[in-house]
Image (tube, rainbow, N blue to C red):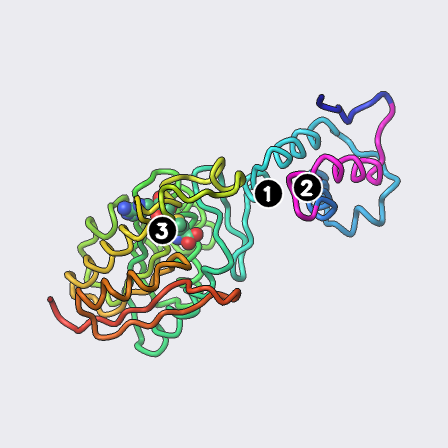
């Protein structure tokens, strides 16, 4: 039975947090911390305020209860508050767009190294999502031009909003496109964190029930889209391709590039030690 928080007399911050912590026990690994984050968000204050004002009454407790119910039903914190922390920025996110993951920051650092070393000016990103990769790269390199694609409308809209928030409209253009099919510009590098999970892989409720399927599943095996990207980039005569991938996709992708023919491929690991992506250098010129 749902226990309602609001009562005849008001509830203090301390009492409200105790209630919220209990409500989040099943769904969150850190219920106290998340209760504090959500109450701070509700009160438009920081977490320190909760400690220094713990005897104050909470206004609009019904509104706070709704936030807690959403989180207790496994809705990701980022969708509830409408933003995600990524690299050195906060990005606007909403349902329909993937919440950017910390491991993608490794991909950005690898691409940044290449851009810097080769003085690259024109790149494309496949599957822009919230704009995480393109926005961070464009902020790092003010002379960089990025064409960012996605097949879904919500990511295109969310990415555009983030691009405008960070004043990057001159540097990043978004296009609705399957992979780079609609991109006609000459490119030096393509970066992508495409969907790469196998169709039948069991994901946690906070992911599978809330995040867009188009951002998660890469096909029956999972690496189908990655292979298509490798082929398309090679056929377009683009020199560099950097992608994130699944922890179990190194072997099949190594076998695939052996078949397709590339100058070199280097795989990289994430901070947990799992294989997480690769950088391919293709032989230059049209293949
Ligand atoms: C894993 S998300 C990555 C989002 C963002 N780049 C990030 O790293 O947080 C993959 C994105 O690729 C998009 N996508 C899926 N299939 C695509 C395709 N065939 N062409 C272009 N984009 C695609 C999805 O809509 C989704 O936004």
10 Å neighbourhood of mark 2: few (<14), some, or many (≥20)? many
Residue 139 position (above or below residue 169): below
> Who comes first in sequence, dot 1 or dot 3?
1
Instruction: Kindly indicate whether the residue at mark 2 contacts the one at mark 1 (C-beta within 8 angstroms).
Output: yes
Taking the spot 77% from the left edge, 27% from the top edge, the residue there is 5
Instruction: Kindly indicate whether the residue at mark 3 contacts the one at mark 1 (C-beta within 8 angstroms).
Output: no
Q: Does 17 appear in magenta?
A: yes
The CA distance from mark 1 to mark 3 is 23 Å
Q: Position of residue 230 (x, y in %)?
A: 23, 60
Element marked by disc 3: loop
Q: Is residue 36 left or right of residue 122?
A: right
Q: Which of marks 3 and 2 is in front?
A: 3
The residue beneath circle 2 is 38
Q: In which quarter of the image is the N terminus?
A: top right
The residue carrying mark 3 has its beta carbon less than 8 Å from ligand 1 = yes
Is residue 218 or residue 166 the one in the foreground? Answer: 218
Image disc number at residue 77: 1
**Quadrant of residue 226 within the rendered picture:** bottom left
Residue that extends furthest to the bottom in the rendered view of this protein: 117
Taking the spot 36% from the left edge, 69% from the top edge, the residue there is 267
Q: Nearer the viewer, mark 1 or mark 3?
A: 3
Element marked by disc 1: helix
| Residue numbers of the magenta segment | 9-30
The residue beneath circle 3 is 196
Residue 175 seen by the camera: no
10 Å neighbourhood of mark 3: few (<14), some, or many (≥20)? many
């Amino acid at each position: 039975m749902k226990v309602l928080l609001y009562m005849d007399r008001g509830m203090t911050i301390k009492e409200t947090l105790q209630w919220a912590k209990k409500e989040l026990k099943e769904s969150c690994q850190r219920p106290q911390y998340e209760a504090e984050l959500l109450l701070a968000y509700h009160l438009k204050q920081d977490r320190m305020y909760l400690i220094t004002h713990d005897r104050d009454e909470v206004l609009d407790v019904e509104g706070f209860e709704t936030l807690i119910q959403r989180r207790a039903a496994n809705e990701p914190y980022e969708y509830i508050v409408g933003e995600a922390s990524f690299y050195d920025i906060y990005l606007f996110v909403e349902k329909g767009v993937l919440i950017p993951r910390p491991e993608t920051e490794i991909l950005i650092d690898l691409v940044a190294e290449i851009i810097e070393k080769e003085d690259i000016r024109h790149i494309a990103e496949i599957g822009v999502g919230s704009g995480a990769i393109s926005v961070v790269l464009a902020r790092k390199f003010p002379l960089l031009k990025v064409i960012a694609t996605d097949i879904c409308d919500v990511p295109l809209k969310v990415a555009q909003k983030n691009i405008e928030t960070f004043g990057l409209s001159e540097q990043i253009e978004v296009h609705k496109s399957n992979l780079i099919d609609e991109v006609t510009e000459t490119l030096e590098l393509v970066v992508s964190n495409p969907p790469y999970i196998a169709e039948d892989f069991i994901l946690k409720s906070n992911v599978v029930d809330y995040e867009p399927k188009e951002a998660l599943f890469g096909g029956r095996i999972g690496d189908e889209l990655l292979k298509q990207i490798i082929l398309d980039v090679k056929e377009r005569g683009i020199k560099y391709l950097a992608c994130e991938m699944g922890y179990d996709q190194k072997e099949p992708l190594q076998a695939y590039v052996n078949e397709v023919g590339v100058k070199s491929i280097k795989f990289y690991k994430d901070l947990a030690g799992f294989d997480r992506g690769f950088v391919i250098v293709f032989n230059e010129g049209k293949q």
